[in-house]
Image (tube, helix red, strand yellow):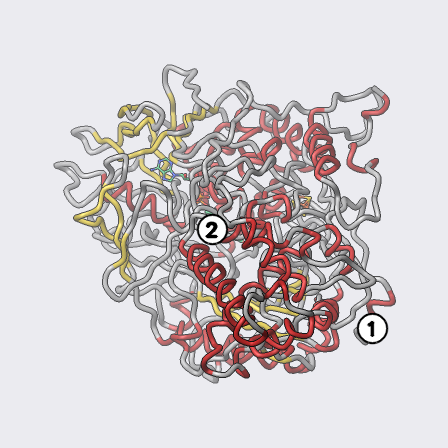
Amino acid sequence: MRKKAQQEYDVIIVGSGAAGGMCAYVLACSGVKVLMLEAGRDYDPVTETPMFQLPKDAPMRGAGTKEKPFGFYDATVDGGWEVPGEPYSSAEGTDFRWWRARMLGGRTNHWGRISLRMGEYDFKPRSRDGLGFDWPITYQDVEPYYDKTEMLIGVYGSNEGLENTPNSSPGVLQPAPAARATELLTKKHAASVGVPVIPAHLAILTERQDAARLSRELWPNNALAQRVTEDSMRSRAACFFATPCGRGCSIKANFQSPTVLLPPAVATGNLDIITDAMVREVTVNAQGRATGVHYIDKTTRVEEHVSARVVIVAASALESARILLNSKSGLFPDGLGNGSGAVGKYIMDTVGAGVGGQIPAMENTPAHNTDGASAMHMYTPWWLYQEQARGQLDFARGYHIEFGGGRRQPGFGFMGGLSSFTDGAYGARFKEECRRYYGSFMWFDGRGEMIPNEDCYAEIDAQGVDQWGIPTLKFHWKWSDHELNQARHMQKTFASVIESMGGNVTSTVHEDGARAIAAPGVIIHEVGGVIMGEDPGRSVLNEYCQSWEVDNLFVTDGGCFVSNADKNPTLSIMAIAWRASDYIVEQLASRSL
Amino acid sequence: MDDNKKPKRFELPVVGAMDMDRRHALKIMALAAAAPSLAACDTGEPVLDVAIAPNPPMNPKAKGTAWDPDMVEPKVMWERTLSSDELASLAVLCDVIIPADDRSPSASSLGAQDFIDEWVSAPYEGNQRDAVLIRGGLLWLDRESRERFGDGLRFRDLTQEQRHAICDDICYEPNTPEHLKAGARFFDTVRSLTSTAFWTTTEGMTDLEYIGNIPQTSWAPPPPEVLRHLGLE
Ligand SMILES: Cc1cc2nc3c(=O)[nH]c(=O)nc-3n(C[C@H](O)[C@H](O)[C@H](O)COP(=O)(O)OP(=O)(O)OC[C@H]3O[C@@H](n4cnc5c(N)ncnc54)[C@H](O)[C@@H]3O)c2cc1C
Ligand code: SF4
């Protein structure tokens, strides 16, 4: 898509994912003229999603490849652990994996849709245990934006009133779908080892949105915003409880930026989008104000410049840090807004560890449909706050548990490991054993909080340049014992849950947390690198994602995170981006920007 | 316009079949995709009435590369490499692994050997390793057949008992004698690929009584017999 209709823009937004999409929606709805630059190609989930296609219709039955690591049908374009022509590197001893996508909407097209709020503790972790940093904002500051974001995008779930697991306001959540049999079985047995199971929160419509009410509540006194929002909500169908969300959703029942945020923003007439536009750097004038951005037009390989009063960088946490570091000038020799030296520092991922199990009680379960909303209906929030506070655990922060299994659609690799359960069955016996074991496997994955540290950072790789001539990133990483011990705790807990179900643990449960933990980046919740704070000497942004040094420069994606709670980050990214956008609207109106 | 009052997806036949054939799937896709642009009617009930396509419409096309393939109309982008002779041997081995029975046909009759051909011909490192393992393994299997059962006999010429005599020795690596370990790795790889090939077909999924990939009007709790089976009543 290439459209530059306006002569002048108030705001340039770099990136069209969760953060860029949300800023574009809020600003365009507020009458601000916005130009969005997206490095990836135009992408339309309505026409491009392979909803019902089966593994047998795909090359190699849909197996993952270098180009499509999560399978052929995964809604990732020009991305994955590698992006063609756009390398990155790791320092010796670091094995960082960086998942990117080059498409309109970025990773919101294929993300897992898990949408958990950070709680009160999560904004003030240092005050609680002396580690990491406190945010310059509280849960109360963000709460209204969580409500608004959930109302807009549609999130199913329930209010359980559990510790540090916030309720949404009345009328905000979509109804949680009924639990699957495997989830009920897990709930029953996990309770015996003290592990609670409650409805999960995912950005999926289980019902059609009440478009008239929601649009009025979201935008009182703004007729344009009400209209585009209401129209957009009406265009979305409810989930029909079939087809994998990771492929995207052609009926717009789940959240993707190109189905939920961009269409209403474009409908205001205030948003233009240029795709295939790879931003290299933010430009500044002699006064040190941002003037616009240089980007490479990927279709012509020519460098272009566009200008605006405000620049929002929302290219995903690490890409945003990269753009700032590459925006060097006489006034900003170490990168734009990097007087603190904090750009690229304190990057975090989520702690991940998993265990699988085979549950004899689930063998020969009567045939039934387990599709549901494709992803989890139930999960386990962190439940050991009290034990942690009493010092009974050897790690400081919590994790939640995602799990699943049962009679799912057979795909690539189906029953590939059955040999070890059956002493090498083949022939008629193999066939029988496949029938018996089908649907009897479960997996449990922990998603835990990592504490930021000095040893985890990204810098410009002196040797690296991508195919657009832009210097690339090099990653450095070191876990602390908090993460390693947490990963070990995860595996032990999952093994005990599986055993409580009468099951057999099928993965190695490591004593050494370093062997249990997933490589950094692999959980794809990378945040930090452009952290916000109260002290301009130690942070890059203020609480509104505004650069301390360049007041018309904002970074509204996960780069601003100063901690990375176990709650998957995207809902918080969008809530914080909305809050920052409101601030930008005010500042533009008062001519402060 | 009466037909268009309701979202089309609720009118789809909820077929009992496990598999939706591709054409059917595409038709549903098209309907689902069309739903959002249905024009509003006079009833005032919430209809899918907004033109969601921004102006100018987003109408992108996949580049058709491995990084950006057409996911709606998938295509295999490489030539198959196994010879007809290799395929014939593989077909016999696939059927030793998954024979026909009263619930479903054999693996080769559903093209398992062709899937393995597609797999070993793919331009990826792991696949190329499997190509060596499998092509070498097929030759090894014929040689083992000659050594055990007489000159001129290939694996596919053996009786079922004779085939089993070899496979019994290589079907489970931990129990396999040292000099047959490579044979066991070959067998295990073919078994895994055959399993994928077979169970992902319509016939395989029907055999498993897989139910899903069918649009529902609502999501119900698990049926009582399932809860009973799991002790959840
Ligand atoms: C498989 C998977 C599952 C996930 N599951 C979950 C989940 O369940 N819950 C959750 O909360 N999070 C999940 N995530 C993480 C989630 O996708 C991200 O947190 C979220 O997409 C971040 O939004 P963003 O806008 O910062 O970045 P992105 O969504 O990555 O969007 C950034 C956009 O900016 C563009 N861009 C980058 N550099 C440039 C440049 N120089 N110039 C122009 N454009 C540029 C990119 O092409 C991209 O389109 C998952 C991620 C993956 C991959
Ligand atoms: S499960 Fe529901 S939300 Fe997800 S892709 Fe299918 S219809 Fe869409």
Q: Is residue A546 above or below residue B18?
A: above
A213 vs A1, left or right, is: right
Mark 1 and mark 2 in contact? Answer it, CB < 8 Å. Answer: no
Density class for disc 2 (Cα within 10 Å; few <14, some 14-19, many ≥20) is some
Pick the front one: A29 or B139? B139
Query: Assess mark 2: CB under 8 A from ligand 1?
Result: no
Q: Residue at x 76, y 66 (%)?
A: A181
Q: Position of residue A42 (x, y in %)?
A: 48, 30
Pick the front one: A253 or A23? A253
Residue A589 visible, this angle:
no
B231 vs A94, left or right, is: right
Q: Quadrant of ligand 1?
A: top left
Circle 1 sits in a helix, a strand or a loop, which is it? helix
Q: Position of residue B123 (x, y in %)?
A: 43, 48
Mark in the foreground, 1 or 2: 2
The residue where tag 1 is placed is B229
Q: Residue at x 70, y 30 (%)?
A: B30
Q: Position of residue B183 (x, y in %)?
A: 50, 72
Pick the front one: A461 or A122? A461
Q: Position of residue A546 (x, y in %)?
A: 34, 42
**As shown in the figure, which amino acid type bears the numbered disc 1?**
His
The residue where tag 2 is placed is A65
Q: Residue at x 34, y 33 (%)?
A: A278
A311 vs B149, left or right, is: left
